[in-house]
Structures are given as C-alpha cells and as structure tokens.
C-alpha cells in the first residue's frame, strides 16, 4: 500500500472531522494491511502438470470463412500431434472448431488421434432442445465428448439480445434465444475434471466477473479460460483481457491456464505472474508446467465484504457530518 493510496482513502475522514469518521478511519487502516497481506507472495503447492497451449491465430474475418476455417483446424491438429511424453493436457481456444458439436464427429476423431491418448479441451458451439450454447468440451482418447460446460455469462448484443423474450410478444421472434436465435446461457458454473485436477472453466469474458470465480462451493485446483480475443483486433483489448485474468488469479490464489485464438495465451501462477505466453498474432504452441495454488486468500473466503464495510463506514461518517453541520 502506497502513501498516496492511504491519503486518498483517508481524505473523506479528514473532511468529515467527526469521532465516527475517526473510528471509520481506524477500522479502515486495520483492514487494509490484512487485505494487502492476502495479495502478497506466499508459497505455492506442488506443480499440477504440463499443459500444451494451442494458439491457431485465426483472424476474425477468416475464422468462419469456409475457404480458411478447415485450414485453421488442421493447423491446431498439427500442433497437437507434435509428440511430448510429458504433456498431460492439451487446450484449444474458444470455438476452436467451426462445426456444431453434433456434426463434428469426424473432426473430433482426428483431434483425438493427433493427441495420441492425451485429453484435449476445446471450445465449440452446440445445440440441444432447439437452443444453442457456447461450450467448452473435454475430449478423451475415445474421440467422444466427455464433460461439457456451457457459458453462463453471455455477451449482450454479441451472443444474445437483452429482453429478447419480451420482443417475441410483439412478433420479433428473431430476438428470442429460446426459439433458436442467439445463444442461451448454461445452467450453472461448475468444476470439470482434468488430468491437472479440478478446473473452474471460464469462456471468454466470464473472466472479468470476480463472482464467477467464487460461484462454486468446492475450491478448484486451477482456473481455465478459453477465449477468442480476435474480436478485439490487435490493439489494447486482448492485453486488457489478460490483465483482468491476472486479477482473478491474484484474488483466488489459484493458477490459470489461458488459451486465446489470436493471443495472448498464457499460464499464470497463483501470484498473478505470467509464467510463459504465446504473444499476439502468433500461431504456435507452448508446453508449460502449471504451478500449484496458494492457500485460500482472504478474498476467496469473504469476497467484497471488507470493502462494503469500509464504504458503509465512509457513507455513515459523511452522513453524520452533514447532520452535525
């Protein structure tokens, strides 16, 4: 915590000039060091294993183009097939294959054959009951989909139209997700089993929500994000998304495996440091050892409660000062 931070935090109390404000200031100064300690470097557990990050670098304007789409799948298969007996898990990015899951069997067989017994995790669209889902799929050596996680936090106007069901009432059926237009959210956030342990899956911008990482009762062994940041181009968006992922890691004290279509793919340790990365605009793969987790952090246990308490004290102090004047 810097002196500047303490001055900015203490400013409302100095303005209020009441005993309640002073009490709030003392409470705040007691909480902040504890909060900061939760983000300090602490020892990590044993390494979880070796993961292969597969980054195809498919530009958004070509990703779904039939003239290029199959080539990007072949590129990922070629990266997958490079032998390394130490690799425990192979991860492809969000919507890594341009085929809906129910018609993707030939591609899945090729992927499983290339992986040669190593499980693969990849992103794909799927349909069920007339609805469509943006999904993460585990693919064992059989080539048949294993566990499936459907994205729960959808992008407004990108993956669905807000209030689309109400629009259906006036005849605008093309806005209603339940009629097959746009994506539907998954039922719940849950853990999936992998060779590296239990992973908390995050698809694309689900990583920006702190509550997503706290949505399961059992603590995962690591965080797993697959994303298609090609939507952001090559400017600041992909880098901002990476930094948001690092925040989730530091909050939870858990490592993260992050695979992005065009970059930045990375393994992040439990202190929020990037262990190794595939940079923006680079097609390739990287075999990276995933570090272990830290002890459960204060934020992982109580979430935003300390911040809410501090803000409540500030508001109470300001309200009291206003009543006294």
Image: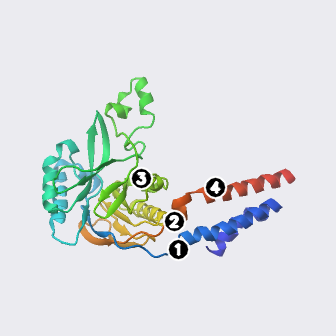
Q: Are marks 1 and 3 in contact (CB under 8 Å)?
A: no
Q: What element does badge 3 sit on?
A: helix
Q: Nearer the viewer, mark 3 or mark 4?
A: 4
Q: Dot 2 corresponds to which residue?
A: 297
- Separation of residues labelled 1 and 4 (CA atoms): 22 Å
Question: Which label's residue is closer to the chain start, 2 or 1?
Answer: 1
Residue 40's disc number: 1
* Of residues 273 and 303, the one drawn nearer to the viewer in this rendering: 303
Question: Which label's residue is closer to the chain start, 4 or 2?
Answer: 2
- The residue lying at 69 percent from left, 69 percent from top is 29
- Separation of residues labelled 3 and 2 (CA atoms): 20 Å
Total marks shown come to 4
Which quadrant holds residue 174?
Answer: top left
Q: Are marks 3 and 2 in contact (CB under 8 Å)?
A: no
* Of residues 113 and 12, the one drawn nearer to the viewer in this rendering: 113
* Of residues 140 and 162, the one drawn nearer to the viewer in this rendering: 140
- The residue lying at 23 percent from left, 58 percent from top is 120
Residue 308's disc number: 4
Q: Dot 3 corresponds to which residue?
A: 206
Q: Position of residue 112 (x, y in %)?
A: 16, 57
Q: What element does badge 4 sit on?
A: helix
- Separation of residues labelled 3 and 4 (CA atoms): 23 Å
Q: Nearer the viewer, mark 1 or mark 3?
A: 1
């Amino acid at each position: 915590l810097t002196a500047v931070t303490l001055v900015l935090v203490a400013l409302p109390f100095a303005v209020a000039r009441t005993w309640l404000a002073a009490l709030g200031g003392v409470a705040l100064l007691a909480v902040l060091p504890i909060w900061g300690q939760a983000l300090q470097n602490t020892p990590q557990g044993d390494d979880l294993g070796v993961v292969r990050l597969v980054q195809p670098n498919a530009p958004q304007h070509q990703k779904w183009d039939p003239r290029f789409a199959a080539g990007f799948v072949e590129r990922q298969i070629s990266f997958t097939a490079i032998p390394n007996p130490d690799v425990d898990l192979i991860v492809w990015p969000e919507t890594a294959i341009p085929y809906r899951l129910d018609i993707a069997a030939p591609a899945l067989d090729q992927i499983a054959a290339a992986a040669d017994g190593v499980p693969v995790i990849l992103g794909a669209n799927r349909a069920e009951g007339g609805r469509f889902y943006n999904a993460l799929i585990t693919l064992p050596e059989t080539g048949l989909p294993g566990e499936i996680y459907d994205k729960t936090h959808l992008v407004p106007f990108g993956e669905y139209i807000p209030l689309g069901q109400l629009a259906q009432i006036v005849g605008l059926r093309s806005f209603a997700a339940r009629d097959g237009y746009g994506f539907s959210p998954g039922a719940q956030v849950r853990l999936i089993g992998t060779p590296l342990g239990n992973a908390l899956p995050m698809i694309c911008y689900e990583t920006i929500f702190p509550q997503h990482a706290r949505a399961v009762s059992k603590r995962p062994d690591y965080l797993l994000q697959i994303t298609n940041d090609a939507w952001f181009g090559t400017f600041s968006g992909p880098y901002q998304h990476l930094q948001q992922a690092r925040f989730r890691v530091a909050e939870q004290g858990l490592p993260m495996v992050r695979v992005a279509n065009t970059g930045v793919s990375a393994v992040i340790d439990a202190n929020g440091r990037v262990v190794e990365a595939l940079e923006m605009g680079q097609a390739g793969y990287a075999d990276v050892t995933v570090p272990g987790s830290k002890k459960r952090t204060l934020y992982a246990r109580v979430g935003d409660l300390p911040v809410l308490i501090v803000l409540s004290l500030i508001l109470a102090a300001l309200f009291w000062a206003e009543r006294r004047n």
